[in-house]
Image (cartoon, helix red, strand yellow):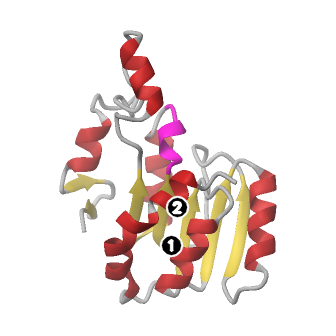
Amino acid sequence: MESSYTIGVVRPSKLALEYLEDKNLKCMADLGCVHGILTFIIAEFIGVKRVYTIDIANDRLEFLRNVMDRSSIDVITSQQDFCKSINLPEKVHLITSFGSLEHVICWDEVVDNIKNDLDDEGYLLISIPNLKSWINRVLLLTGYQPRDLEISKRKPYGIHSFCSKNCHRTHQNCYLQSV
C-alpha cells in the first residue's frame, strides 16, 4: 500500500487535529484519499459522522468502502479527478488533502472546488511535500523549474506564497486563515 507519505503526515497533523477535535464537525471531504487510511483516522479522531472521499482510482475507493463498512461513519465515495467540479450535495466542515495536490498541474479548479464545497466556517487541512522531494531534486539537477512553483493560470504566484500567508481570499466575505 502507498502508506509511507500517509503515515508520515499523521504526527505533524496532530496539533491541527487536536484543535479540530472540539469543533463539532459533522462532515468532511478528502481530495485524493488514496486507500483512505488517513481519512479514517481523522474522521474517527475528530468524530465526523459523514465523509466524502474523492479519488481517481476505483480500486482504492473499493478498499476504503470495505474498511469503512465496519464503521459507524457514513462514507460516500466518488471516483473522479478532484480537479474537475465535484459538486458535493452539502457544504462540508473540513476538507483534507495529503500528498495529492503536488500531482495537480493547475490549482485553479481545486481552489474553486474548495471554495464551493467548504462551509464558510469550515477548515482546510492540506499537506504538500516540500522542495527537497526526490522529483524536485532531479528537476533542479537537470536545470528545470521544480514542480508546484506556479499553481495558477489566473494569477502568477508560487506555492510558497499561496500556503505561507496568514490569509488568502477565497470567498467574497471569507478568508482561509492559518490555525
**Extent of the magenta region:** 99-105
In the image, residue 56 lies at what x, y percent? 70, 47
Q: Between residues 134 and 105, which one lies in front from this camera angle?
A: 134
Can you tell which quarter of the image residue 62 is in?
A: bottom right
Q: Residue at the spot x=46%, y=57% of the render?
A: 114
Q: Which residue is mark 2?
A: 7
Q: Which residue is mark 1?
A: 92
Amino acid beneath label 1: Val
Q: Residue at the spot x=37%, y=9% of the render?
A: 143
Which residue is farthest top?
143
In the image, residue 133 lies at what x, y percent? 42, 35
Q: Please indicate, yes or no, whether residue 169 appears anywhere in the rendered image.
A: yes
Instruction: Determine if the magenta segment contains residue 100.
Output: yes
Q: Nearer the viewer, mark 1 or mark 2?
A: 2
- Horizontal side, residue 110 vs residue 37: left or right: left
Q: How many marks?
A: 2
Can you tell which quarter of the image residue 156 is in?
A: top left
In the image, residue 168 lies at what x, y percent? 25, 52
Say which element carries label 2: helix
Say which element carries label 1: strand
Instruction: Determine if the magenta segment contains residue 103.
Output: yes
Pick whichever of labels 1 and 2 is earlier in the sequence.
2
3D distance between C-alphas at marks 1 and 2: 24 Å
Q: Residue at the spot x=47%, y=58% of the render?
A: 8
- Horizontal side, residue 8 vs residue 65: left or right: left
